[in-house]
Each structure stands twice: as C-alpha cells, then as structure tokens.
C-alpha cells in the first residue's frame, strides 16, 4: 500500500505520466504558491513584505520533488510575469519581476529544487530535525541570500548592515514559523504515504 501511494504521489514527474497530468500538477502547485502569496504583511521600513510564498515553495519541493518543485516555481514566476495576478497583493506583470523583490522570487526555484533533492535522496532529511535543517537552509540561505543580493543591486544599497536590516533580518523570525509549518505539513503528508 505504501508503495502504491508513493507511485501515485510521484507519477506527475514520472516520464511515463501524460502531458495533461504533468500540466495539471504544475498548475496546481503554482496556484498553491499564488494562494499563499496573498498572505501578505507589509513592513513600513522595507519594500519587501512578509508573505506565505516560502511556506508553499518549501512544501512544493517535498511534495513534488526537486524537478517538480523547480518546474512549479518557474511556471509560477513565468505566468505571474505575463500578468496572472497571483504575486503578493494579487499583482502580476513583468514590472514585479524587475522590481526590488524579484530576487526572492527567483530564489524560489533553487530553494524548491534543493529541498526536494535532499528530501528524496536522504533518509535523515525525511525526519523532522533533518527536514527543518534543509528547509532552513533553503529559505534562510538560498531565498533570503538571493533576495538580499538582488535588493541591494536594485536599490543601489551597498552598506551590508543596512541591506541586511532591510532584506534579511526582519524576515528570519517569520520564516522560522513558515519553515516549522511547512515541515509539520510535510510530516503529515509523509505519514499518509
């Protein structure tokens, strides 16, 4: 029974799965990220809001694997870039992908891939401490790292302490909550396989 559920879980990324199945799973995952993006808390001192996107990105890596998670986040960005209003605040368009928050969103792709790769490759990553560790690295190093570098480039801020105060430090506590929530949902998902 466990093997059957695992096959059903990963079949969207199996080479034998049909195009329609892959398309459906990709759009469902991208919509999950878009829905989570609507959980948005603006901060008055930075152009970067707190959103639920990272929760969904980390979950996508676990549920759909490395390739699936990377594909889903790429489709999310591409469709949002052409105008689907599912970025934070029900916005969309190319201007968002050229703005100061674009680096965080671009960071979603390697973060989902990294999470899915380690989760599916190593037994320790499936246990809660390991899962928390890989999700923390994906979020706090990959997403915040790429996002903060992009924020500095797009705003012209070169002072590292100011840049960290605007683009990374205010988000760590909220990200830790999202990491814990994504890990908990992942554990529930894994227990049903």
Image (cartoon, rainbow, N blue to C red):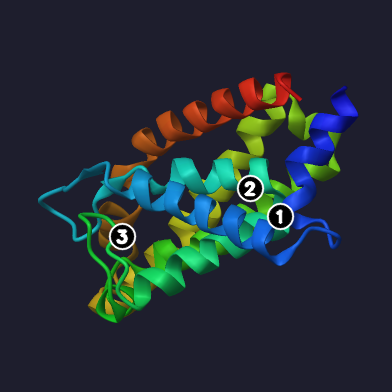
Q: Which residue is mark 1?
A: 66
- Image position of 27 with respect to 157: above or below: above
The percent coordinates of residue 157 (x first, y second) are: 26, 73
Crowd around label 2: few <14 · some 14–19 · many ≥20 (10 Å): many
Q: CA distance from mark 3 to mark 1?
A: 22 Å
Tag 3 near tag 1, CB within 8 Å = no
Q: Earlier in the sequence, mark 1 or mark 2?
A: 2
Q: CA distance from mark 1 to mark 2?
A: 6 Å
Element carrying mark 3: loop
Element carrying mark 2: helix
- Taking the spot 36% from the left edge, 44% from the top edge, the residue there is 36
The percent coordinates of residue 95 (x first, y second) are: 25, 79
Q: Earlier in the sequence, mark 3 or mark 1?
A: 1
Q: Which residue is mark 3?
A: 87
Q: Nearer the viewer, residue 49 or 88?
A: 88
- Taking the spot 38% from the left edge, 63% from the top edge, the residue there is 148
Q: Nearer the viewer, residue 148 or 178?
A: 178
- Taking the spot 27% from the left edge, 53% from the top edge, the residue there is 165
Tag 1 near tag 2, CB within 8 Å = yes
Q: Which residue is mark 2?
A: 61
The percent coordinates of residue 145 (x first, y second) are: 47, 60
Quadrant housing residue 23: bottom right
**Residue 139 appears left or right of 133:** left
Which quadrant would the C terminus be assigned to in this image?
Answer: top right
């Amino acid at each position: 029974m466990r093997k059957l559920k695992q096959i059903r879980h990963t079949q969207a990324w199996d080479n034998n799965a049909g195009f329609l199945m892959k398309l459906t799973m990709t759009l469902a995952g991208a919509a999950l990220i878009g829905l989570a993006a609507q959980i948005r808390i603006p901060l008055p001192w930075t152009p970067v809001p707190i959103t639920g996107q990272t929760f969904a990105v980390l979950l996508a890596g676990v549920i759909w694997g490395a390739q699936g998670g990377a594909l889903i986040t790429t489709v999310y960005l591409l469709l949002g870039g052409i105008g689907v209003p599912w970025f934070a605040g029900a916005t969309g368009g190319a201007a968002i992908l050229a703005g100061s928050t674009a680096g965080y969103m671009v960071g979603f792709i390697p973060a989902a891939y990294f999470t899915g790769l380690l989760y599916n490759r190593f037994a320790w990553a499936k246990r809660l401490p390991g899962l928390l560790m890989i999700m923390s690295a994906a979020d706090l190093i990959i997403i915040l790292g790429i996002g903060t570098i992009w924020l500095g480039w797009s705003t012209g801020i070169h002072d590292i302490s100011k840049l960290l105060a605007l683009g990374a430090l205010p988000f760590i506590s909220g990200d830790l909550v999202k990491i814990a929530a994504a890990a908990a949902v992942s554990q529930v998902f894994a227990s049903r396989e």
